[in-house]
């Protein structure tokens, strides 16, 4: 038999089988087992539950970027801005001369079977020997240039109107982008706040459960009456119900955020950013009010639409003015009975110059009056829109500044209440431990502290 060799990795008892001995190395088996475990874990990674995987995160900046890329409202605003900017090119047509170039090649073949009798003047049938095929060829080229010198200011007012509408489209796009950013930011912060509330209530559940176990234990040993245990149990039950409500609110807030981002409702994304601090200007809230009224893109878009409506009304008021245009036509042609007439240098050339004055004050008078009334109505509508936007913005800004001021006061009061509640809780726990206060006083202090913390 073979003698077993000592193992370098460790010692073990030899195993004999059919006259052969093997030495088992525990460390080597452990290494092979670890490698198989790693491969097995990697293979089962897609089937692991979500809490066991590396959870993906979603920052506020990433949420805003996704919303700007996927928001249908923003895509619609971009299309509207592109459409409004395209109208400026139409307005430039009146300043650019109209140039047209036409060129043609003509050919004809006529089989002549009849002729005019020079004596009688009648038409006679030619014999077969005199029947012949007559061919004619020709070429012509025409260059026409027309330019409107004056059209009653329609072109100029149209250009100004198109420019105002293009600027209105740009401001509307900026306003839509700001609304998307604000909506997603608020939804993200609402979800963060709801999740923070859920965590706080979960900690409250743990605390009340521990308090219930303590009260039940003290009741069992006869230190406190049964009422203390019942009160602790009721407090723990209320904390569990509050936690269930908080879980529902957090799920609803996350669902609302994912709807804005067009993500699946069951997305397992962890929100990492906390609620940022608001830096107010040093010169007070009045600066915010002035800045909001002066820099509002929605109000600026309404003002630009008003400017465009005024330009359209001004153009409609100049309907009675005539239009003046000038033009020239250069014509070159050639005609012959051979294909040599097809040449790039025709022998016949003619040039025509013209100046047109058009004035038709009574033509389509009813339509002209109707267009003027529509333009005037558009101006009044745009003025009302500007006033409505301004009043709405003033109301919203005043409400927002009032909420900011109340939030600042509430934040300062919350700090004081939290410090006071913590001190009262310490005193109540000490009094309860010394037997100087009932259990209800401790519960009341703990409830006040939990509310102040929330």
Image (cartoon, helix red, strand yellow):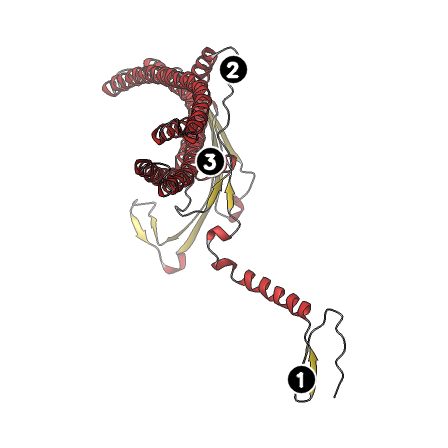
Quadrant housing the N terminus: bottom right
Distance from Cα at disc 2 to Cα at disc 3: 28 Å
Q: Is residue 448 above or below residue 294?
A: below
Task: State which tag comes first along the sequence, 1 or 3.
Answer: 1
Q: Is residue 423 above or below residue 137?
A: above
Q: Nearer the viewer, mark 1 or mark 2?
A: 1
The one nearer the camera, 37 or 183, is 37
User: Mark 1 sits on what residue?
Assistant: 16
Tell me which corner region of the image, top left, top right, bottom left or bottom right, holds residue 127: bottom left
Distance from Cα at disc 1 to Cα at disc 3: 73 Å
Q: Nearer the viewer, mark 2 or mark 3?
A: 2
- For residue 281, the mark is 2
Q: Is residue 6 above or below residue 139?
A: below
Distance from Cα at disc 1 to Cα at disc 2: 86 Å
Q: Position of residue 22 (x, y in %)?
A: 69, 80
SS class, disc 3: helix
Residue lying at 66% horizontally and 66% vertically, measured from the top left: 31
Please say whether residue 80 is visible from this viewpoint: yes
The one nearer the camera, 338 or 379, is 379
Q: Position of residue 358 (x, y in %)?
A: 35, 18
User: Mark 3 sits on what residue?
Assistant: 68
Q: How many marks?
A: 3
How would you rate the neighbour count of disc 1 (Cα within 10 Å): few for under 14, some for 14-19, many for 20 or more? few
């Amino acid at each position: 038999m073979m003698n077993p060799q000592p193992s370098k990795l460790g010692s073990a008892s030899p195993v004999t089988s059919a006259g052969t001995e093997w030495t088992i190395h525990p460390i080597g088996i452990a290494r092979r087992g670890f490698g198989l475990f790693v491969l097995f874990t990697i293979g089962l990674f897609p089937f692991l539950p979500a809490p066991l995987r590396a959870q993906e995160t979603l920052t506020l900046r990433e949420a805003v970027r996704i919303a700007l890329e996927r928001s249908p409202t923003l895509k619609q605003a971009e299309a509207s801005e592109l459409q409004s900017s395209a109208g400026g090119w139409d307005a430039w047509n009146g300043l650019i001369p109209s140039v047209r170039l036409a060129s043609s090649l003509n050919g004809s073949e006529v089989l002549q079977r009849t002729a005019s009798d020079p004596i009688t003047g009648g038409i006679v049938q030619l014999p077969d020997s005199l029947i012949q095929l007559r061919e004619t060829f020709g070429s012509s080229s025409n260059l026409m240039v027309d330019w409107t010198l004056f059209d009653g200011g329609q072109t100029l007012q149209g250009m100004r109107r198109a420019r105002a509408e293009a600027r209105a489209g740009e401001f509307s796009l900026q306003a839509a982008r700001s609304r998307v950013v604000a909506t997603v930011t608020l939804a993200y912060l609402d979800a963060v706040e709801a999740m923070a509330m859920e965590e706080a209530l979960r900690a409250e559940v743990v605390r009340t459960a521990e308090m219930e176990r303590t009260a039940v234990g003290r009741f069992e040993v006869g230190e406190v009456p049964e009422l203390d245990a019942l009160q602790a149990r009721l407090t723990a039950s209320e904390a569990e119900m509050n936690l269930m409500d908080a879980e529902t609110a957090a799920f609803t807030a996350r669902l609302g955020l994912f709807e804005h981002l067009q993500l699946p409702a069951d997305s397992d994304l962890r929100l990492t950013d906390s609620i940022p601090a608001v830096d107010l200007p040093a010169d007070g809230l009045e600066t915010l009010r002035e800045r909001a009224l002066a820099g509002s893109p929605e109000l600026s878009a309404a003002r630009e639409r008003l400017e465009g409506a005024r330009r359209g009304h001004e153009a409609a008021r100049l309907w009675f003015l005539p239009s003046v245009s000038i033009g020239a036509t250069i014509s070159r042609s050639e005609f012959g009975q051979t294909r040599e007439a097809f040449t790039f240098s025709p022998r016949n050339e003619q040039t025509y110059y013209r100046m047109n004055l058009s004035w038709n004050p009574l033509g389509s008078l009813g339509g002209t009056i109707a267009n003027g009334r529509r333009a005037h109505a558009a101006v009044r509508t745009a003025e009302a829109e500007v006033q409505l936007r301004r009043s709405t913005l003033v109301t919203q800004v005043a409400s927002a500044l009032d909420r900011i001021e109340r939030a600042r006061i509430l934040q300062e009061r919350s700090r004081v209440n939290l410090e006071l509640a913590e001190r009262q809780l310490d005193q109540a726990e000490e009094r309860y431990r010394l037997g100087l206060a009932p259990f209800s006083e401790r519960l009341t202090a703990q409830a006040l502290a939990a509310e102040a913390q929330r």
